[in-house]
Amino acid sequence: MFNNKLRGSLTAVLALALMAGFSTSCLATFDVMDEDIEGGYYGNGYTRPFRNAIEGTETLSAEDLAFMQSVQYTRITERWYLRALVGHPRVKLNKIVNNSTYPLDAYQVALPNFTDNLYQLGLAGGKIWGNWGAEIELLISKKLKYYANPLFTTIPNAANAEINTYALLFNVQYIIPHWISLYPRRLQIHLDAGLGVGLNTTNTTVYDLNGAPIESASGRQTPVAGMLGIGARYQITPCILFDLTYRFISWGKTKYGPILGYQLKSDELTSTGLFVGLTYQI
């Protein structure tokens, strides 16, 4: 009886082993087990036998089938690219304070915060490695015009400041793999972060009680700048992807003056909003 039970157990184990081996070989044949590894976040763009075995290319429209055949060479995970983004974000100039020396530092700024919507442009070039990317980006903002009347709470004269902002950033991005599939086209969800140096130039003018300009002064600062973002890219041609990104940009600190012994500073110049653009894969 014991031998019969042992023989039965060995037979069952052998059968399970054969089934496991058969299943593994079948899965490998259909490219299930290595699709994520070989294909990266693009999927396996060269063969896709398992997808085709289940869905079949006959489920694709003629347009999608032609597109799939035309983009096979783009589905590699190492690509150089160029990108242009444009946006109209909310720009905030915060924490404007009197930075003059004693005794002029006793006056309080009448308008410590200022907001406006400005057009901004981002030009970048970089490379993708699998799910990671690195790029250099140049950010340019339209001139911000700050007008305060009165400039100080106890002095009724006015002031006008024009601020030009630029930034050069080194950005890193992470592309979330296999989140949404619109096969055969690609939809990439990406997280972005960047750090670099800004260039803020200012031109400030103070006016008298009659509105006539008294004196002007210019300044330049090179503060630390940074960026955080989340976005999505959708493939519209084999080499061009449409990009929609929500970004927060810190342009750094700014200073204004000195004018007639007065000097102002702002600790925060930021942008927050949507950017749209195109990415071209080289």
Image: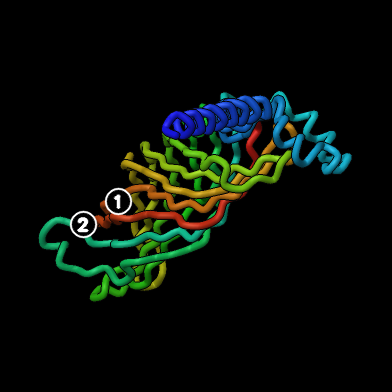
Point out the tag, 1 or 2, that comes first from the N-terminus: 2
Q: Is residue 228 visible?
A: yes
Amino acid type assigned to the residue bearing label 1 in the image: Lys
Q: Nearer the viewer, residue 51 or 147?
A: 51
Query: In terms of secondary structure, where does tag 2 sit?
Result: loop
Q: Is residue 227 left or right of residue 223?
A: right
**Which of the 4 image quarters holds residue 78?**
top right
In the picture as drawn, the residue positioned furthest to the front comes out as 1
Q: In the drawing, what numbered circle is on residue 145?
A: none
Amino acid type assigned to the residue bearing label 2 in the image: Asn
Q: Is residue 229 left or right of residue 65?
A: left
Q: Nearer the viewer, residue 201 or 178?
A: 178
Q: In the drawing, what numbered circle is on residue 255?
A: 1
Q: In the drawing, what numbered circle is on residue 99?
A: 2
Image location of residue 99, percent across then percent down? 21, 57
**Which of the 4 image quarters holds residue 268?**
bottom left
Above-or-below relation of 191 to 205? above
Q: Which residue is located at x 57 percent, y 47 percent?
A: 179
Q: Which residue is located at x 49 percent, y 41 percent?
A: 139
Between marks 1 and 2, how big is the CA–CA gap? 9 Å
- Do the residues bearing badges 1 and 2 touch, measured as CB atoms within 8 Å? yes
Q: Which residue is located at x 50 percent, y 49 percent?
A: 230
